[in-house]
Every structure is written in structure tokens, then in C-alpha cells.
Amino acid sequence: MKNILIIGCGLLGSSLVRSIHKKKVAKKIFVYEKSKKNISKIKKLRLPCIIVKKINEAVLKSNLIIFCTPMSEYKKIILRINKNLNSKHIITDIGSSKLKSKEVIKKNLKKNIFWTSGHPISGSEVSGPEYGKPDMFENKWCILVKDKSTNLKHLKFLNYFWKKMGSKVVIMNSEKHDKIFSITSHLPHLIAYNLVKSAQDFEKKQKYDLIKYSAGGLRDFSRIAASNEIMWRDIFFDNKKNVSKAIDIFIKNLNAFKRDINSKNNKSILKKLIQTKKVRSKIIKLKQDINKPDFGRD
Amino acid sequence: MKNILIIGCGLLGSSLVRSIHKKKVAKKIFVYEKSKKNISKIKKLRLPCIIVKKINEAVLKSNLIIFCTPMSEYKKIILRINKNLNSKHIITDIGSSKLKSKEVIKKNLKKNIFWTSGHPISGSEVSGPEYGKPDMFENKWCILVKDKSTNLKHLKFLNYFWKKMGSKVVIMNSEKHDKIFSITSHLPHLIAYNLVKSAQDFEKKQKYDLIKYSAGGLRDFSRIAASNEIMWRDIFFDNKKNVSKAIDIFIKNLNAFKRDINSKNNKSILKKLIQTKKVRSKIIKLKQDINKPDFGRD
């Protein structure tokens, strides 16, 4: 690999810059970033990259192009760089939803150019290059998408690339990806946003100052509900079919739980509470979370 | 204060033992615990307390009695110790729901005996005396309940007591307490249980192994969903009226959100996502959570 172009240098884009630099995977790292605020942060942080003003010049010099912008930006950027793309360019992204962006890419990307989609399962509620870190992808899953039209050579390279970043790579198709993450990621975020909104609604209606008592549970959800709004709007819109289904499953469970409470169905409630408890142990065992009470918070 | 009797020595009971000892608030700390497993743990941990086999002997020797059992145990214990209670006994509890236990207490506690209810906003997903810690209540809220029948002298003492434990004391009535915590604590727990259950349902139906991808959001909820099932069943049953209302508010918001996604209502979604984000900053400012991305997890 010679040169890499990172398009969009926020939390994950800047983590890639740091990680690529640390692992010495590229000769040059170009960064295209449209936000002036982020550009001045990148300069101040002295990130090991070359900030380019003209994206197409960097495209011509790069072998690997990684889209790290919100998914709603893909189309515009594709149309801008199309003329300089060739079939040897390895193009990928880190978007959280796949089926819809596959459509957008198919419709807009120049013929005979390959796009091999990826999704590192990492990030946090904060945004911006100042929060990026070189070990962001270390021991985290990275999903690579393999559909009928996938270029297997590019897929193989990206497998190598993400392993270099420290990730555990899993390959699946877009459909499976979008279903799985509608449940493990999109639904939890959507619920967090709506729980916080419900608390706000209640606070207004009752005129109680209740956010200050959030240590009893609400505060956990507020973290996720603080995630980047553009990124999450794009995910909810792009994966709306699966997300809607996930909401329906969830509401069905909520209503059954409500009935259990109101009828004091001891057996059913206890069974549910005991069953769900097991998932935590499984998550800890799978090293998907820290093995400390209360996430090790004080 | 001379002697204190802690009834039930799990996570919070054992934290009280440690904290009372550290702050030198009592001459003797008696502990009544019905679980043999917990008793052997307490002995092994050499907690600074006297384990009593006969609860009534300890009642006679104690000035302050603190119920730290699940709320469903209150009745049985009250009936057992009634004969040895007198109006000078300061009796309190740490239960998470107030209106229903107030009824139980009123119905079962001997006449002319006072019970002054409390609720420290602390704890975690783990149970048992081995997880208790002396600073469990440090800088945490402790709600003390003041209703018409509250003994003000006892309330004053408990205010002093919890401040000694390091807590910030707030006084409110049972009704307000149960409303506030139905939103900030009971609803979040109920949602966490049901989200994890929805993931389990989905996993079964689709035969996807999805728990391993929980780092995208689900893992956060799994922590809360691992909380003690007896304690939480009691809370849901005892506060079912407020909890049901909270579920209704929440489902209404979920359905509106689903409509926004399906109609791609950009303005409405962005407004919601931006509004809820503000709550996180408020929570951090109020020092109700750690000011580090991702709770400071790695």
C-alpha cells in the first residue's frame, strides 16, 4: 500500500490516521475534511497526515480511499471524484448501515469501479478529531461486506488492512449486516434517544427537576443519546425497514411486560429478568465489555 | 447513636456496614441476614459487624434499624419484630419504591411505632456483600420521605445519619418520589430488560449469533439488565401505576419516532436528536456521571 486518502476526519477518520501511521501501513496519508473547525483541530493536534484542499488531486495519488463521512455525504463526494477513479482504486467506507448506501453507490459510482464496504464496530458518544485514538479498532470487530458484485481482491486487501488496524474481521452480506445491527446498535440508540426525550417530556409536564436523579439508570442511556445527530439520522433513515421492525418487536415485549406487571405475574417476570441477566455474562465472556461493576465508574 | 441493626446484608447492607464502621457512627453494628451463602461471605470478608441469629435480640439492643432486604420481605420481618419495637426505635429502609411499602408498613407495623423511609440513589448491577464498599453513598443523593405521619425527630436524625454516610440528602413525599424514579430509574431498567429480551428473541428467530456484536450499543443496556431480579420485580410490582404510565409515554415517543423515520422527517428527527444530546451535558455538569467518553471504558 502506498497512499491512503481519508475522506472526513472526525472521531473515526482521525483514529484511522493515527492507527495507519502507528502501524506504518501507508507511505502518505491524505485527509480531505470539509469542516474548517476540524481542519484547525487536526493542525493543532499535528496529526500525521497531509490535509488536501482539492480532493481530486489526492484521489489521483491514492491507492486506498476510505469514506469516513456521514453516509448522507457519499453521493455528493462520489459525483465529485468519479472522473478520477479507476478500477484499481480500493474504495471503502465505515458506514453503520449497508443496503441503502449500496443503492446510492451503485446508482452514482462510475461503471467498473469497485466499492467494498466496511463497518468497524467502534466509536463513542463524542465527535471530532480530538477524541480519536490509535487503538480505536484494537480487538474490535470490523465487518466487511461481501455481496454478489464484491471485488474479491479488494476484499482480501481490506481484510489485511483491518487486521493491521488490530480488528477482528468478519465477512457477511449487506442484508445480514443491516438486520444484526438494527438490533444490537440502531435500536439501542433509538431507545436511548426516546428514553431521554420521555424524561424531558415528563419533566416539563410535572415540573419536577428530575435529571439530577439520573444516577438510578437514566444516565447510562444519556451517554448513547449524546451521539452525533447527523450520523444517527442517516443510520435511522437508511436502515428504516429493519429499524421499524426492531421497534415493533420491542414494543410488543414492552406491552407484554406491562401486562405482567399489572397482573403481578410473578413467574413470567422473574423468568424474563433471569433470562436477560445471562446476556450480560455472555457479553463479558465474549470480551465485548469491561468486567467491572458499573463499567468501572466511581 | 449506640447500636445499629442492618437487616439484609447484600450490596447495600454491606456497604452500610463498611461506611458506618469507617465513619464511627455506631458502637455496635448488628447484621441479620437470612442467606447462609451471604453469611459465610460476610465472615470470610471479616466485615466489622456482629452477625445475629435471633433478630429480636438485636432489635432490643438497637437504636436504629435499617431494612436492606428486597421490599417483598418487609411484611414478614415486621411481623416478627413487632413485639420488641418501641416508639424510640428509629426504623428506616432503603427501598426504591415508596407508596406501596408505606401501605404494607401501615398495615403491619405495630401502632405508635415510626418508620421513616429512605432511598439512597446508589448501587450497581452486581449483588452480594462482596461487592459492597465504604464509599458507596459518597456524594450520592439520598431521598428521605416526609409524609403526614412522619416523625420529624427521626427524620432529622436520618438526615444527619445519611450526611455522615457522605450522601446529599433530599426530602420529598412518597408520591413525588415514586413518580420521579419511575422515569429516571424504573423505566430505564425495564427498557434494558426488554431490549435485551428483544435481542434474544431476534437471535432465536433469525438464528444469528448477534450478542457478540453488542459493542455497538446493546452492551450498555445489558449491564442494567443484569441487576438483581428479586429487587427489580418488587420495584415493578410496587410502583406499577407510575411505571405503566411511564411505559405509555415512552411507547408514544417510540411510535412518533418510527413515523419520523418512515416519512424521513429530517427536521423533526434532528430536533429530537439535538435536544436529547443536551441532557448528557446536564448530567455531566450535575456530576451525575463520569466526564469521560464511553464511561472511561477501554
Image (tube, coloured by chain):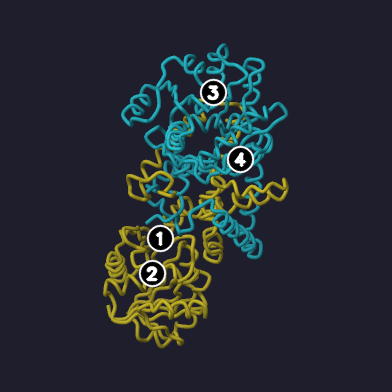
Chain colours: A yellow, B cyan
Q: Residue at 27% across / 71% down in the picture?
A: A23
Left or right of residue A274, residue A199 in this image: right
Distance from Cα at disc 1 to Cα at disc 4: 32 Å
Q: Is mark 2 on a helix, strand or loop?
A: helix
Residue that carries the numbered disc 1 in the rendered image? A122
The one of A274 and B265 positioned closer to us in this rendering: A274
Three-letter code, disc 3: Asn
Mark closer to the observer (3, 1): 3
Check if mark 2's residue and mark 1's residue have beta carbons within 8 Å.
yes
Spatial CA span between label 2 and label 4: 39 Å
Q: Mark 1 lies on which chain?
A: A
* Residue B38 vs residue B161, the one in the foreground: B161
> Do the residues bearing badges 3 and 2 touch, measured as CB atoms within 8 Å?
no
What label sits on residue A134 in the rendered view? none
First reached walking from the N terminus: tag 4 or tag 3: 3
Q: Which chain carries label 4?
A: B
Question: Is there one chain holding both mark 2 and mark 4?
Answer: no
Give the spatial CA distance, label 3 vs label 1: 53 Å
Which residue is disc 4 drawn over? B181
Instruction: Please state the horizontal and vertical placement of residue B36, each as a whole percent of the image.
Output: 37, 21
